[in-house]
Amino acid sequence: MIATNYSPLTRSLLAAGLALAGTLASFTATTTNAHAAGVDRYQAQLSTALQAPKAKIINGVVWNCKGDACSGEIDGSRSIYTCIKVAKAFGPLAAFSGPKGAFSAEELAECNAKAA
């Protein structure tokens, strides 16, 4: 049997490499689940359907609307601020949802009121 002696530096580098691999694997698993669950997009339903598809940039993100359905990627802003900007750009909203779920009737009313 061959005995291998590793220096303290080699052991430290090996431990650091294993820690980095574990961190990357954990991060990949976390983000994959978030994308699979569909939380990487905002969804909005317009009160009045558009006659033709329309796209606008809001908070640096392209929002696409077709009929009464609109969506845009999560932009890092608070959901209420994004909702207000979407309502200003496309008109009053009947529904809005983001990473924390669908807006309540009160939140939606606040969004539409501030957008008017």
Image: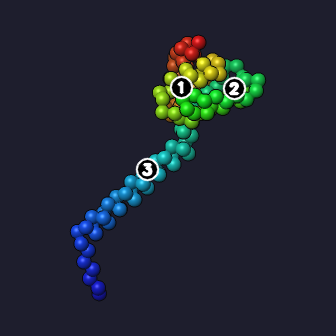
Badge 3 amino acid:
Phe
Question: In whole angstroms, how far apart are the C-alphas of marks 1 and 2?
Answer: 17 Å
Is 4 displayed left or right of 24 in the figure? left
Residue in the image at 69% along x and 26% along y: 68
In the rendered view, tell whether residue 11 sits above or below residue 84.
Answer: below
61 or 14, nearer to the observer: 61
94 up-or-down from 59: above or below: above
Q: Secondary structure at mark 3?
A: helix
Residue drawn at the location 60% of the way across and 30% of the way down: 57
Quarter holding the N terminus is: bottom left
Q: Between disc 1 and disc 3, whose residue precedes?
A: 3
Q: Position of residue 58 (x, y in %)?
A: 58, 28
Q: Quadrant of the C terminus?
A: top right
Q: Which residue is mark 2?
A: 68
Number of the label disc, if any, that sits on residue 82: 1
Residue at 54% from the left image edge and 18% from the top image edge: 111
Quarter residue 64 falls in: top right
Give the residue furthest to the left.
Answer: 8
Residue 14 lies left or right of residue 49; in this view the side is: left
Query: Which element type, helix, strand or loop, lies under badge 1?
Result: helix
Mark 2 is on which residue type? Asp
For label 2, count other residues whose C-alpha is less than 10 Å away and answer few (under 14), some (14-19) or many (20+): some
